[in-house]
Amino acid sequence: MSFGFDLDLLRTFTAVVETGGFTRAAERVHLTQSTISQQVKKLETNLGRTLLIRDRASGRVRTTEEGELLMSYARRILSILAEADEALGRSVPVPKTVRLGVPEDFAGRRMIDLLSGFARTTSHTRLDTISGWSVELRRLLQAGELDLALIKREPGDGSCIAKWEEPLSWVGSRTLSGGTDPIPLAVFPPGCIYRERAIRAIEESGRRWRIAYSSQGLMGVQAAVASGLGISLLPVDAILPEHQPLNDADGFAQEPASELALIAATRKLEPAVRETADFLIANLTALRRSTKTPIARVN
């Protein structure tokens, strides 16, 4: 089967067409409106076709010519699948979608491999993962658009399911060690805890600073530091061999550790959400132990 014809995406697409909009479709398939939008966009990307357009006069969603053609096949495919299930005397359980948010600077290869491993080992739970900055993940969680989120925060900043200490270190390069005035910083966008910590620490030391480089991604900040564009405050496990750790002798006092926390939208977790949380706790604990980073399980 072509990757474009993922059955879950076809079900979502069919629901949107039959109900005439994303809101009603979300109610039918028990997903959030944003998730419905993401799934339709994914289907369009997989097929390389625009399937739906919004009618400005009525506000309803209608199919393009390609969407209408796909809809005829989608109905048949889903109908045949339901017929086969009935003939075999069984019903296929619909996987429970768990909406997970992960930090932008944490969505690296190890995290992707971890989530892929979870997807391979469970058929009754489907992860819908989004990466973003912690402030945005908190907002999505509070709005009910996420079930779980891993966020970077100051230690003890609210309740959580589990938390991990995250040691930090100032880093420069062999060509830029911190004697420049004002201090050039390589940082993430506003709202990032490392950026806020770095600026506050430099100002408290009575020195000046400037933003020499800003990047949405960890790789960009790492590269900027390695090339000598700027100095940064990073988690210890994000330091590269090309980086030069800085200390008191360079004018940079050690910063207290920040915290990686797993938080949930509600106190009472549904079974699929609890299973996902337990998986994350077990595997992140194993990763942190390899870097000798402590964990504290809260509940």
Image (cartoon, rainbow, N blue to C red):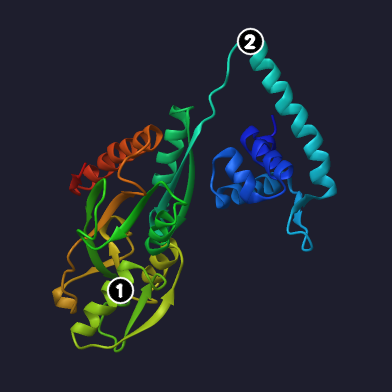
Identify which amino acid the numbered label 2 is placed on: Leu
Identify which amino acid the numbered label 1 is placed on: Glu
Q: How many marks?
A: 2
**Residue 16's x, y, as percent?**
69, 45
Above or below, 268 relative to 133? above
Label 1 – label 2 distance at C-alpha: 59 Å
**Residue 281's x, y, as percent?**
29, 40
The quadrant of the picture occupied by the N terminus is top right
Q: Is residue 187 visible?
A: yes
Question: Along the line of sight, which residue is nearer the eye, 239 or 264?
Answer: 264
Q: Are marks 1 and 2 in contact (CB under 8 Å)?
A: no
| Residue identified by numbered label 1 | 196
The quadrant of the picture occupied by the C terminus is top left
**Residue 37's x, y, as percent?**
62, 51
Viewed as shown, does residue 288 lie left or right of 127?
Answer: left
**Residue 282's x, y, as percent?**
28, 36
In percent of the image, x 58 and y 18: which residue is there? 91
Viewed as shown, does residue 193 lie left or right of 146?
Answer: left
Mark drawn on residue 88 = 2
In percent of the image, x 63 and y 46: which residue is there? 24
Q: Is residue 50 visible?
A: no
In percent of the image, x 73 and y 44: which residue is there? 17
Viewed as shown, does residue 150 lie left or right of 250?
Answer: right
Mark closer to the chain start, 1 or 2: 2
- Look at discs 1 and 2 and give the one toward the viewer: 2
Say which element carries label 2.
loop
Q: Residues within 10 Å of mark 2 (few under 14, many from 20)?
A: few
